Image (cartoon, helix red, strand yellow):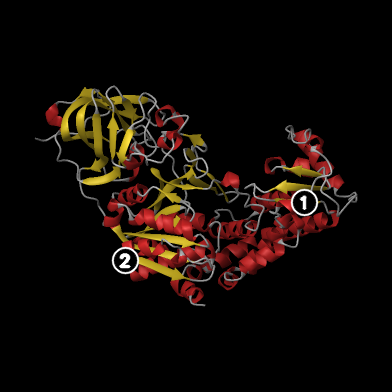
């Protein structure tokens, strides 16, 4: 018989003949059970068990419900992001397929972009090993929204091999290459390889795994590497090279994929992520159903608090050329506290400018058209690639339900450590290549403000690195490839010249403060009104006119990272400050001569950038082809 998709605007109870299998053709995403070792907080990403006993998980595809249990799959990994499939792919319907043993009721719900929830259809299923299919319309999801289903067990029930399917074959072929850039993380890298190699669905789609190993702790020396290498066989391409940063590692992975494999798509993965393998399948299958070649990225879940969604999508402020969360993107949502059903702000479709390279799938034809990454070492290479792809007419989508776990930025302070150089230099390079503005007044104004703020915080090393970044930007694009192999050593040496750039990790070496915590208790409240902020800034400038009382003695106070704000440190002569990850401290000492030297040079160089920016834009844009060419990259790989 012929069936049609049921409109989500109609509440229906399906007859038995409407559930007959046979329409599901292509698996879009599996319905996943949590791992046996997952704590309840992580289980919330897979199952909403609030109204049931804990579901007994027999495997990643099989769950046992006791009589009377009601379990919802309105969860991050198991709901279907219908709004994204409706907007960006050729599909007009989706099929939910389940195999049921027992007697249960299945109810399907859908949401609107504003988070309103509607019941779509429901049915009672009984039998042993019975496969049922429910067809669902994708038409009314232009603004966003999800599908999910709930199961109420009348007696003991087994759910097996559930998934969301298309009723047709994809538009595009799908052979996946996985590219991993790694530096001294052999344990993490091999764990990612094991996840990829052990997944049967992914295994059938996998053309190659390219690992660019740039460290001196080699992946091939990890104890469990031979086993995973045997699993992957000749699909594993392990290449070793000097440390060229993330851009160099990913450029190598892309080059190897394009020249030595038949992969139709390449997905970049960081080496320090934990991976849900179906995320790669979901991204690949989504890309295969798009009308035009599309970059598909994964969202970021917080590695240190695994039920928390950290990044939903990324955007670029074109005026200041700063990255930011995409409009309407949520951050910090904890699914263990608020389910998808209750989170109205997670149902609107979020459009992005780029995908972070913690997980980003790139179609082969896109890479062949727009070239390899820029030689930026780290920072901004992923954002620039997304902007470049967009300028060439290719869409970028960050797909909910496709995600990795990664250390969140709240446990990093990379705008103040050695990475400050790459933030500053590469922001200017990307602005030269992609800013719609003729001049850079807003960018340089913000640069000077940021530098003054760092100086008030006694972060002299960060400003020194910014000054190097400004000079290197002005030196022009012809220096980027030449600098690539040695730039990290230069940056680390410059940072080490300042006490705030020297991290102390040994407990015995951490200096005791002169004063207790009560000394700063009243300082940590920020000025709010404009007049109060101006007074605090003026006082900070005055403080850098008076001499320091004890330039080399014990620090006056000890501060946690969260309290190391400019309006606190600007009042002090010295402080020991915890690093953002809590693993050590840096000692910051006020030095008026250094303060004014760095401040003057920041103003001078930023005025120079503003004056020369139109010419710099032309220089960098004229060099685009050279900066992204395989020939130039190969010369660096082989150096």
* Residue 490 marker: none
Up/down of 297 relative to 3, above or below: below
What crowding class fits label 2: few (fewer than 14 Cα within 10 Å), some (14-19), or many (20 or more)?
A: few
Q: Is residue 474 visible?
A: no
Q: Residue at x 65, y 66 (%)?
A: 472
- Image x and y of residue 554, in percent: 83, 50
Q: From the viewer's side, name the closer residue of 25 and 446.
A: 25
The secondary element bearing badge 1 is classed as: strand
Q: CA distance from mark 1 to mark 2?
A: 52 Å
Residue labelled with disc 1: 588
Q: Quadrant of residue 41?
A: top left
Residue depicted at x 45% and y 33%: 335
Q: Is residue 593 left or right of residue 230?
A: right
In percent of width and height, residue 4 lies at: 17, 34
Q: Residue at x 25, y 52 (%)?
A: 171
User: Which quadrant: the N terminus?
Assistant: top left
Residue depicted at x 31% and y 66%: 233
Percent position (x, y) of residue 195? 37, 53
Contact between marks 1 and 2 (CB within 8 A): the answer is no
- Which sits in the foreground, 449 or 42? 42
164 over 183 or under it: above or below: above
> Relative to the observer, which residue lies in front, 16 or 537?
16
- Inspect this view and state whether residue 311 appears: yes
Q: Is residue 8 above or below residue 533?
A: above
Answer left or right for 253 relative to 506. left
Q: Which residue is mark 2?
A: 233
Viewer-side residue, 283 vs 584: 584
Q: Earlier in the sequence, mark 1 or mark 2?
A: 2
Query: Which image quarter: residue 160?
Result: top left
How far across and down, in percent of the image, does residue 273 sit? 47, 51
């Amino acid at each position: 018989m012929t069936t049609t998709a049921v409109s989500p605007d109609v509440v229906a109870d399906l007859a038995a003949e409407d559930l007959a299998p046979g329409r599901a053709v292509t698996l879009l995403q599996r319905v996943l059970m949590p791992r046996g070792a997952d704590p309840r907080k992580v289980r919330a990403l897979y199952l909403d068990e609030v109204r049931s006993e804990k579901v007994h998980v027999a495997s990643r595809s099989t769950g046992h419900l006791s009589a009377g249990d009601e379990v919802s799959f309105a969860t991050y990994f198991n709901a279907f992001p219908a709004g994204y499939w409706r907007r960006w792919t050729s599909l007009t319907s989706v099929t939910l397929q389940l195999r049921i043993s027992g007697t249960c009721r299945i109810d399907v719900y859908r949401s609107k972009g504003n988070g309103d929830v509607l019941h779509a259809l429901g049915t009672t299923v009984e039998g042993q090993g019975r496969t049922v299919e429910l067809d669902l319309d994708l038409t009314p999801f232009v603004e966003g929204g999800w599908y999910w289903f709930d199961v109420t067990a009348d007696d003991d029930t087994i759910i097996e091999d559930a998934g969301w399917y298309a009723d047709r074959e994809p538009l595009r072929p799908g052979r996946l290459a996985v590219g991993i850039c790694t530096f001294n993380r052999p344990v993490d890298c091999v764990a990612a390889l094991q996840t990829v190699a052990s997944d049967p669905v992914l295994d059938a789609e996998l053309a190659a795994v390219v690992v660019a190993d740039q460290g001196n702790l080699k992946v091939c020396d990890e104890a469990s590497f031979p086993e995973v290498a045997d699993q992957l066989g000749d699909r594993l391409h392990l290449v070793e090279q000097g440390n060229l940063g993330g851009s160099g590692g990913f450029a190598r992975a892309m080059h190897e994929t394009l020249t030595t494999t038949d992969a139709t798509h390449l997905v970049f993965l960081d080496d320090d992520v934990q991976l849900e393998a179906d995320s790669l399948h979901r991204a690949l299958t989504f890309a295969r159903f798009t009308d035009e070649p599309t970059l598909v990225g994964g969202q970021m879940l917080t590695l240190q608090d695994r039920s928390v969604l950290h990044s939903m999508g990324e955007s670029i402020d074109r005026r200041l050329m700063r990255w930011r969360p995409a409009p309407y993107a949520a951050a910090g949502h904890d699914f263990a506290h608020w389910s998808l059903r209750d989170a109205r702000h997670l149902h609107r479709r979020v459009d992005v400018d780029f995908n972070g390279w913690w997980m980003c799938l790139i179609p082969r034809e896109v890479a062949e058209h727009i070239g390899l990454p820029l030689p930026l070492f780290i920072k901004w290479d992923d954002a620039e690639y997304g902007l470049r792809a967009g300028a060439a007419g290719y869409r970028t989508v960050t797909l909910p339900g496709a995600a990795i776990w990664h250390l969140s930025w709240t446990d990093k302070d990379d705008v103040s450590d050695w990475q400050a150089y790459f933030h500053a230099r590469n922001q200017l390079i990307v602005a030269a290549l992609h800013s719609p503005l003729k001049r850079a007044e807003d960018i340089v104004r913000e640069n000077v403000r940021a530098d003054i703020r760092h100086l008030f915080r006694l972060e002299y090393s960060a400003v020194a690195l910014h000054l190097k970044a400004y000079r290197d930007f002005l030196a022009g694009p012809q220096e980027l490839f030449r600098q690539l192999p040695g730039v990290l050593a230069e940056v680390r040496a410059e940072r080490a010249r300042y006490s705030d750039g020297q991290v102390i990790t040994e407990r015995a070496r951490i200096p005791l403060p002169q004063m207790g915590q009560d000394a700063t208790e009243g300082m940590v409240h920020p000025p709010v009104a404009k007049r109060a902020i101006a007074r605090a800034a003026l006082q900070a400038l005055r403080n850098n006119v008076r001499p320091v009382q004890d330039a080399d003695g014990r620090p006056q106070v000890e501060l946690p990272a969260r309290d190391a704000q400019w309006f606190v440190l600007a009042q002090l002569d010295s402080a020991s400050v915890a690093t953002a990850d809590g693993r050590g401290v840096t000692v910051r000492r006020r030095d008026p001569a250094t303060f004014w030297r760095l401040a003057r040079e920041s103003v001078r160089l930023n005025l120079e950038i503003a004056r020369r920016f139109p010419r710099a834009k032309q220089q960098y844009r004229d060099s685009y082809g050279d900066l992204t060419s395989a020939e130039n990259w190969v010369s660096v790989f082989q150096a």
